[in-house]
Image: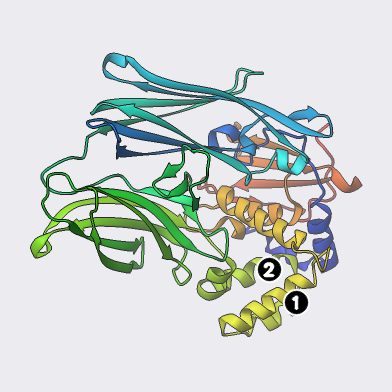
Amino acid sequence: MDVNIYKMKRLPVLIIIAALTVTLAGSVPAGSKFDLLGRGSADRFFLVDHAAFNSATPGKIRLEVYYQIYNAALNFYRQGNGYAADYEISVSVYGKKDKLIDSFKQTKRVRVLTDEKAKSRFDYRTNQVNFELDPDKYEIKLILSDPNSDELVERKFKEKLKYRFEKSPRLSDIQLVQAVSAVGEEQSKFDKGDFTLVPSVSHKYGSSDALKLLFYFEVYQGKAESDSIRIDTKLRHATHGMLYRDSLTRQMGNGVLREFREISMDELRPGEFRLDVTLVGRRDKKIDSKTKYFELVWSERSLLVHDFKSVVGQLSIISIPSDIEGLKQQDTYEDRLQAFNAFWLARDPTPGTPENETKTEFYRRVHVANENFGYLRTSGWKTDRGRVYIVYGEPDQVEDYPFVENRLPYQEWHYYRDARYRKFVFIDETGDGDFRLIYPYDGLGLGPDY
């Protein structure tokens, strides 16, 4: 029997909206290691990246190691009127025969005021560690650990560093950037020339309506006699091909060209992208090139312009057909935006304030659903687990049974909040990760397993 969550749309809309609104205040114990896929949270919320540049010291390379730690990776505990979490980060550089070349270690304490911030999958801190190294092959290991427990997560990568000083101009690595500002009075590890550049460790863009790809690279003149160089930049979409291209000629100046670039992505479709930067010499001869991959996720504009069907489909989860009928009939971006804003204005629990809490929570849940419950080519918000998550939020308890004798893999989600127990059971009938909801579809009428 083909059972799915679409039957939830037959519930009275007030029940659905109440579920969404009430669970805004629902809570899971702070720092809970609850994970929708049954894996450790810290392993998924500790991100690492790196880039190499010529050092100011001749013959040396500056290896920049970037890391990003989300609140969901940490164990928070009650402290005063809020919560705190301790963590230790260590970065070690190993050479030949596992010889330790250099290392960095730091212990930090994070404080937040609310339970929601303590378990947030969106709040994070980004840092950077710089190493001055000789040209050679290295292995770099990063360890995130909790000083109050035995929990730790390790990341490692290998890198062959080469000093970029040759007969022809050469490129450094490309650093993706999430934020930029003018250099301040106090020196920062993020400083490059006139800019302070915070790295984009996740390689994801699109969390705001002002969509810009920010990136930085350096060009080293080397022994070349020419004072200028041509730089070609291309953006390629994974499925739609090349969507952007430019060609600029720059003056080398003192032998090192620091290039910070911004490219508008307002009109680009979300998806996987490839950024290519190429140095071109006389007679269009390619001298050097570097590549970086990134993802453009979503913004209101990109969804309303390029994926309007998904906008309507997502809103239908928490509404009845008449609520979105007017939205479905709009053809232009301006008209769609007006109808979209009207939909959410009617559901704003605090009109007149900058934030619509219900809207923010709804799209947070859509994001979590897409990150955790997609399978094959199906987006997470379209799946049964994704739709239950969007309506009811984080389960208070999840029981995962991937291997049970004489039974298909299944999960049980338990909700104890709001003085009304709900239990949702999902079965993976085909073994492809498509967990289907079984009756009762509203989660009511089943007793806890105790």
Q: Nearer the viewer, residue 419 or 180?
A: 180
Q: Quadrant of the N terminus?
A: bottom right
* Mark 1 secondary-structure assignment: helix
Q: Is residue 118 left or right of residue 309?
A: right
Instruction: Provide the residue designation for mark 2.
Output: 315
Q: Where is residue 282 in the image (x, y as percent from the top left)?
A: 10, 61
Q: Residue furthest right?
A: 419
| 230 versus 322 height, above or below | above
Using the numbered discs, state the Cα–Cα distance from disc 2 to disc 1 in whole angstroms.
9 Å
Residue at position x 85%, y 49% from top? 445
Give the residue type at disc 2.
Leu
Q: Are marks 2 and 1 in contact (CB under 8 Å)?
A: yes
Q: Is residue 416 left or right of residue 332?
A: right
Residue at position x 68%, y 64% from top? 6
Q: Nearer the viewer, residue 79 or 248?
A: 248
First in sequence: mark 2 or mark 1? 2
Q: Where is residue 419 in the image (x, y as percent from the top left)?
A: 91, 46
| 168 versus 125 height, above or below | below
Q: Which of 421 and 417 is in front in this view?
A: 417
Q: Residue furthest left?
A: 283
Q: Position of residue 155 (x, y in %)?
A: 45, 29
Q: Which residue lies furthest to the front in this view?
A: 185
How many residues crowd mark 1 within 10 Å: few (<14), some (14–19), many (20+)? some
Instruction: Provide the residue designation for mark 1.
Output: 323
Residue at position x 72%, y 64% from top? 7
Q: Where is residue 46 in the image (x, y as percent from the top left)?
A: 53, 35
Residue 353 appears anywhere in the view: yes
